[in-house]
Amino acid sequence: MTKEPSPAPGGHPADTAGSRLRADSLTLRYGRRTVVEDLDLVVPAGSFTVIIGPNACGKSTLLRALAGLLPPTAGTVVLDGADIASYPPRETARRLGLLPQTATAPEGITVAELVSRGRYAHQRVLRQWSREDEQAVVDALAATGVDGLSARRVEELSGGQRQRVWIAMVLAQETPLILLDEPTTYLDIAHQIDVLNLLHDLNRQGRTVVAVLHDLNHAARYATHVVAMKDGRITASGAPGETITADLVREVFGLPGIVIPDPVTGTPLVVPADTRTAGSGAGT
């Protein structure tokens, strides 16, 4: 008999309205080093939430905790109204998929075999591989443009190809919530845009997407909700047009410049100042 997940402490419908995933008073430590401290975060249901911030500010650590892979030192991660720690691993994997910053494939595994592992959460003792599983893998391979590589060994691929294969595995999982840590790493600009367009399409189809991105202009163009972090805390959150300002870029990244409307999309476009010259640029 499957144990029902425990309600989050103090949880009731009003607490989780409009959100599938949240963190309450979250503190995360590695040994004695505090990486995230007393953080509150709400991921709006149906959003494309992008987490931005400088290196080593706690973004990847936070994402691991949101996926249930890093137990909190204090506080709670709430998934679909329940403490994520109360879900069995297979149930968590049916609710959310995670692409970590670094992933290692077993030696000799083919692309199709690796992507097929995304269907693990859907397997049962009395329900093994099905046509539904096969179609999910085919669709994921096609969506990421690696269907022509399905018989190749992952170790033979370029970094960009491998990254798209890992994304395909997460897509094959078919979860309503997808977490990705720097999904455009190793990709050239064309494939970066392909991946972000794919995530945008998945979001428009109803999936909630949470991604860590380094490129502020990509975050501004694709996100519906932005979370800015610095030193393990959230400094700002909200719609990109309200959040990504010159003041925020200066405060969080220590980078002077201006923010203007993107001439194509109208979203914020960060233009750094030439730091080789005097002056910090105007703010918006």
Image: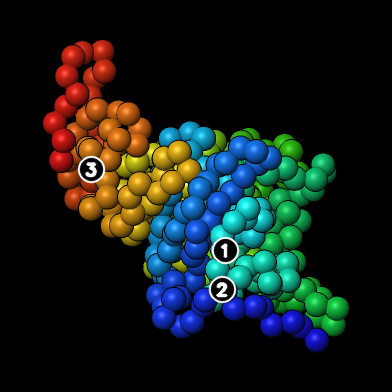
Q: Give the distance between the C-alpha atoms of the residues marked 3 and 2, in whole angstroms.
A: 36 Å
Q: Which residue is mark 1?
A: 76
Q: How many marks?
A: 3
Could you tell me which secondary element the residue under label 1 belongs to? strand
Query: How far across and down, in percent of the image, does residue 174 sit?
Result: 60, 69
> Along the line of sight, which residue is nearer the eye, 275 or 142?
275
Left or right of 263 in this view: 243: right
Query: How far across and down, in percent of the image, does residue 281 sit?
Result: 16, 27
Q: Which residue is mark 3?
A: 245
What amino acid is found at the position of numbered circle 1 in the picture?
Thr
Query: From what the image shows, is residue 121 above or below residue 145?
Result: below
Query: How far across and down, in percent of the image, does residue 157 sit?
Result: 67, 38
What amino acid is found at the position of numbered circle 3 in the picture?
Thr
Q: Which residue is mark 2?
A: 9
Residue 270 in view (yes/no): yes
Query: From what the image shows, is residue 260 above or below residue 117?
Result: above
Q: Give the distance between the C-alpha atoms of the residues marked 2 and 1, in whole angstroms.
A: 8 Å
| Proximity of marks 2 and 1: CB atoms separated by less than 8 Å | yes
What amino acid is found at the position of numbered circle 2 in the picture?
Pro
